[in-house]
Structure formats: structure tokens, C-alpha cells
Amino acid sequence: MNKQDIIKALDKVIAVGSSHSIIDSNAVKNIDIAENRVLVEVEIGNPTLQAKKKLETDVISAIKKTYPEAEIKVHVVGKIATQAVNVKPERPLPNVKNIIAVASGKGGVGKSTVTSNIAVTLAKMGFSVGLLDADVYGPSMPLMFDVENARPTSVTVDGKPKINPVENYGVKMLSLGFFVDPNDAVIWRGAMANKALNQLLFDAEWGELDFMLVDLPPGTGDIHLSMVQAVPLTGAVVVSTPQPIALADAKKGVAMFAQPEINVPVFGIVENMSYFTPDELPDNKYYIFGQDGAKNLSKDLDVPFLGEIPLVQSIREAGDVGRPVALQDNSPLEKAFTEITKNMLTQLVKRNKELPPTEIVRITNTSGCAAD
């Protein structure tokens, strides 16, 4: 058997729904000849069983006219036409200029406290700020912003109902805490939690924002992966305390964002509870959890150190009454959070100048990610 004879025979075969032969349309992907046997592999745009069967019959019939004794096997694959590669999908949250995740390797290190105070500091600087409380199993932002009893309202945008975020201290905010009883435990599987987060992200009228801060849960779990899958994060901030057990988990948090498949720049590490200074001894510093742990970690990981926050009772009290300490003008703590925020902004400007926009990633399995 001669391959050119088979190609000539197939040039008369037209697939269902096509106006060209399977040769002219490049549908024939392979012709394999061995003695009196021939294998033909064809790819067509019509994936129906009926179309496949008809094409298989037509191919066999066409070849039989030239080689009646041939043993013919036809393998037909249906391929659905895809969107042109030069058509880019719409960017999620197009009115939000920068999305910054605040993470921690473990709980109890003050991640939410740092997030709330950075948000307030940005608002005081004149930026438009949104805050998404993504800690679905332990939402704390409604309490920290003194809006625990508030309920988001509905607003119509372009004929569609949207969630109107709650606002206080110049920060727009959404949290699962607004929608569940504070005395009830949120017992959800990952898919349910992710669906709720997507609703807070995409079914809300955030408006024009310079910054959206995302307060992530502790650890490196499903919510974190869902967030990098949902929106292109501009960067991340990792919060830790100085003790070795917290630093070990913070290192994992930095490593998660640094994975090539995720590739979210880490703006730096914030060290919370750095030292304790009692009121009666204002010049003394007691390093209860160790000294310079996060600062040394930032050097080891080649990640910027954004600053330190002392262990001060007023920070906890301010959070409990819903008035972040960054609101206290000219106080030492307000200055500390201002310095951290400025350092973060410096890294953000550098990142936006030197690096391309972060891509959304598509989670392929539990052990890795692939860029979408």
C-alpha cells in the first residue's frame, strides 16, 4: 500500500458539518501503514457519536475502493472548538488596583490585628481601601472595626443586585462574620467556604479601590489556594512572632507564595510581639518570645523586614473595642504601623515597576499548581 494513494482517497471524504475534505482541513493527524494494515487517526470538530461513526465508515469505504483487501482501523477524536488564544479573559475586580494578602504560618500571632491597622493607616494616607476577611472559620474584622452588629445592604448595579460592603474608619469591609451568628461555629467543607468567599469577592460592589487587603486564615491551606486561583494578588505580607515555632511556620508561608507556580511577591515580614515594655519601666525592653527572630528570618529568606510591633496591652484593648490603635494620632504605635505601611508601599512600588502583573493560577492537584 502506498501512503499517497491513501491520502488521495481521503481527499474525497468530508466530515459532517465541514465544507472541506479531511485532508484539506488538516483533520487527518496520522496514517500508519504496516503490510496490508492501515491506521488512520482523524480529529474533527463535531464530537457526536453519529458524526464519528459516519466518518469512520466513509474513511473505510474510500480506502477500500483503492485497496479492497486492506485491514483498516479508524480512530476518530472529536474536538470542540476553543476561543481564540488572543482573546484575553476579563480581569477579575478590574476596579481594584492592588490586592495584598496578609498571611501567617500559624494562628495567634496577630495577623488580623496587623491587617486592620495597615488598612486604617492606608485610609488615613488618603487611599481608598477595602478589606476582605477571608478567615472564614474565625472572622474577627467585624469586632475589630466596631461593626459587629452591622449587616451589609443590597445595592443594584447595572440591573444586578450586589452586596454593599460595611464601612468604618474609611475602610470598606466584608466578612463572613456579618452573615453568621457569632455564637455558631462555621462547620463547612472547603468547597462551601470557597463559594462563600467568591460571593464576597465578586458579588459585592467594592467600587474603585487603591488597595484591597485580604486577611487570610492561619496556615497554608485550601483558602489560600482558592484566593490565588480567584484573583491576581499584587503581593503578600507575612506576620510572625519572634519565637522559633512561629518562625518555622512563617517560613512555610513565605515558601508557599514563592512557589514558581504561584509566584506572588512577598513584600516582607512583620514581627509582632517583638518585646514587652512595662508602663513603670518605659526604657526597658523584655524579649519574652526571643529577639530579632523575624528580622533574622527575613535575612535568611532574602525577604524585606517591614518592621516590628511591641507587645502592648493597648493594642489588644483597641482591637477588642473596635478601634485600631493606628487611629491614635502621633502615638508610638500609630507611628510603628505607619512605618510598616510605608515600607510595604515601597516594596509595592518596586514590585510594580520591576515585575509583570501577577497571574491567576489554576490548581491542578493537591501537590502543585499550574499557571492558567
Image: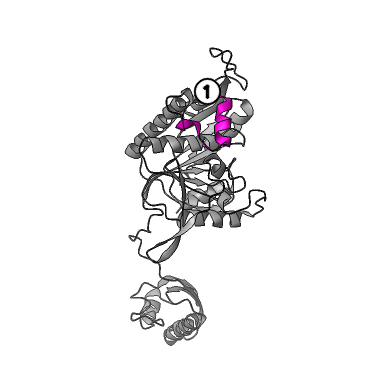
Which quarter of the rendering shows the C terminus? bottom left
- Residue 368 place in picture, x, y as percent: 55, 48
Q: Which residue is mark 1?
A: 296
> Which percent across, then down, holds residue 346?
37, 31
Residue 1 in magenta stretch: no
The residue closer to the viewer here, 77 or 65, is: 77
Number of marks = 1
The secondary element bearing badge 1 is classed as helix
The x, y position of residue 191, in whole percent, is 59, 57
Q: Is residue 329 magenta?
A: yes
Q: Is residue 269 left or right of residue 366?
A: left
Of residues 73 and 331, the one nearer the viewer is 331
| Looking at the image, residue 274 lies above or below residue 235 | above
Residue in view at x 36 percent, y 49 percent: 208
- Residue 3 is situated, as x and y percent measured from the top left of the image, at 40, 74
Residue 44 sits above or below residue 112 on the image? below
Looking at the picture, the colour scheme in use is: one colour
Instruction: Name the amino acid, label 1.
Output: Asn
Q: Is residue 131 above or below residue 45?
A: above
- Does residue 214 show up? yes
Image-quadrant location for residue 4:
bottom left
Q: Which residues are magenta?
A: 311-330
In the image: residue 313, left or right of residue 228: right
Structural crowding at the residue carrying mark 1, measured as other residues with C-alpha within 10 Å and reported as few (<14), some (14–19) or many (≥20): some
Q: Identify the image quadrant of the N terminus.
A: bottom left
Identity of the residue drawn at 44% across and 83% down: 63
Query: In this orientation, does residue 266 appear?
Result: no
